[in-house]
């Protein structure tokens, strides 16, 4: 096995601290070839598709990667900005703002961002921190609710990078923060700001879906989502039952966590609900799943079923309350490490 050469300035032995902020990922461009590369990496992860390789790979390469990229690329094209993918743009902003907030608190900690799939990758982000002389790394996934398919997969990628590191850095890993007071406060601030501008409406919380089998095998994701919903309801002064929870982004024919978001919206419209607000607490940055799947597809489902007014409440993105929450989460996990040393 080949091991990476280490930066010369690591030899002084003085520990230096850095943070790697990790999000899911995005294609490099809204084109079929770029989406195909992205999906090939994403859907080859055994944490994401828990099927035997001998069964799944013929389907993936013989069917999915032939048919899905062009369709997905057309969807990405509808949300792409002059700066690039919204997910990439917001994650980069979060990285810079987090570094600034930490700096204002007297913590001179370099922050880099990475994507679990696509670019910049986790290995590249860790290499960049090591090149800056970092010997202690806090890995901070942008997934508030733990799942094996998300946070667990980030751990796998960090461990895979470590297999080729000559000097493995000291690592800390943020597991989840689904009920963190700062995170819940940021969610409540976002909803309240929307209501102040548009008035109150029925609120539906839509989380990314997960195969039901994963939860049956012990994944704590659903419980974490429901915990977030209860905490947000309490922060907003609502009864727990006032917030509905649903799950989106189903893939394949297996049974996923229910109720499904689009089905829930159609039923609300049929039940006479004329206006609904949809918020996605699990997505800390706007992306295809919020801007196209919710803002476009879910909206159409509600209106076509008889609803009259649909609002998507945008993600936390670069809102100050969210960046402050990220700073506080990072600070708690950095305790005991010297963060005053110049980076």
Image: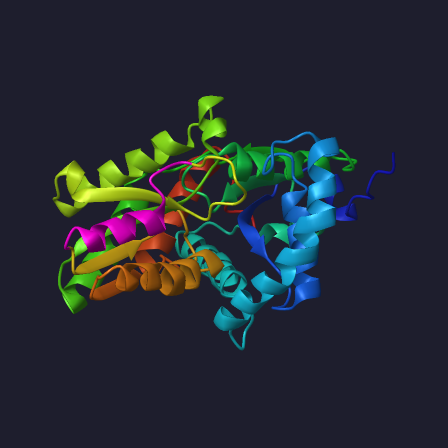
- Residue 276 versus residue 22 in the image, above or below: below
Q: Percent position (x, y) of residue 195?
A: 17, 61
- Residue 294 versus residue 170 in the image, above or below: below
Q: Which of the two residues, 276 or 281, is positioned nearer the viewer here?
A: 276
Farthest residue toward the top? Answer: 217
Is residue 130 something one can see in this rendering? Answer: no
Q: Which residues are magenta?
A: 257-272
Is residue 283 something one can see in this rendering? Answer: yes
- Residue 3 versus residue 275 in the image, above or below: above
Q: Which of the two residues, 18 or 16, is positioned nearer the viewer here?
A: 18
Residue in the image at 23% along x and 37% along y: 230
**Residue 271 in magenta?**
yes
Q: Percent position (x, y) of residue 148?
A: 53, 32
Residue in the image at 21% along x and 61% along y: 307
Q: Which of the two residues, 217 or 224, is positioned nearer the viewer here?
A: 217
Main SS, magenta region, reads helix
Query: Residue 243 vs residue 65: left or right?
Result: left
Residue in the image at 29% along x and 34% along y: 227
In the rendered image, which quarter is residue 313 located in?
bottom left
**Residue 201 in magenta?**
no
Residue in the image at 54% along x and 37% along y: 149
Query: Residue 140 vs residue 294: left or right?
Result: right
Q: Please tell me how many numbered marks the rendered image carries.
A: 0
In the rendered image, which quarter is residue 335 located in?
top left
Query: Residue 319 vs residue 149: left or right?
Result: left
Farthest residue toward the right? Answer: 1
Give the quadrant of the N terminus: top right
- Residue 294 versus residue 250 in the image, above or below: below
Q: Percent position (x, y) of residue 168?
A: 71, 34
Query: Residue 245 vs residue 107: left or right?
Result: left
């Amino acid at each position: 096995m080949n091991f990476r050469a280490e930066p010369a300035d690591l030899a002084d032995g003085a520990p230096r601290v850095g943070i790697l902020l990790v999000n899911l990922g995005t294609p490099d461009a809204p084109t079929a070839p770029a989406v195909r590369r992205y999906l090939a990496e994403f859907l080859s992860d055994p944490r994401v598709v828990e099927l035997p390789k001998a069964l799944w790979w013929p389907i993936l390469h013989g069917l999915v990667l032939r048919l899905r990229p062009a369709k997905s690329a057309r969807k990405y094209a509808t949300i792409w900005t002059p700066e690039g993918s919204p997910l990439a743009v917001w994650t980069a902003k979060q990285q810079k703002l987090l570094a600034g907030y930490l700096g204002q608190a007297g913590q001179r900690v370099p922050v880099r961002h990475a994507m679990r799939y696509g670019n910049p990758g986790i290995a590249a982000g860790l290499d960049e921190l090591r090149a800056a002389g970092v010997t202690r790394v806090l890995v901070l996934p942008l997934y508030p609710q733990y799942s094996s398919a998300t946070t667990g997969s980030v751990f796998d990628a960090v461990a895979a990078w470590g297999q080729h590191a000559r000097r493995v850095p000291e690592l800390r890993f943020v597991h989840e923060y689904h009920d963190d007071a700062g995170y819940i406060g940021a969610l409540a601030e976002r909803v309240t700001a929307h209501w102040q501008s548009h008035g109150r409406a029925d609120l539906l919380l839509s989380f990314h879906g997960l195969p039901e089998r994963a939860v049956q095998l012990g994944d704590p994701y659903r419980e974490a989502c429901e915990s977030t919903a209860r905490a947000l309801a309490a922060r907003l002064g609502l009864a727990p039952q006032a917030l509905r929870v649903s799950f989106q982004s189903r893939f394949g024919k297996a049974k996923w966590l229910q109720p499904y978001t689009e089905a829930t919206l159609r039923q609300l419209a049929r039940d006479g609900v004329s206006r609904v607000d949809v918020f996605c607490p699990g997505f800390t940055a706007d992306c295809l799943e919020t801007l196209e799947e919710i803002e476009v597809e879910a909206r159409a489902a509600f209106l076509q079923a008889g609803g009259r007014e649909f609002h998507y409440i945008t993600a936390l993105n670069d809102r100050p309350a969210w960046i402050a929450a990220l700073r506080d989460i990072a600070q708690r996990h950095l305790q005991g490490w010297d963060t005053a040393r110049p980076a």
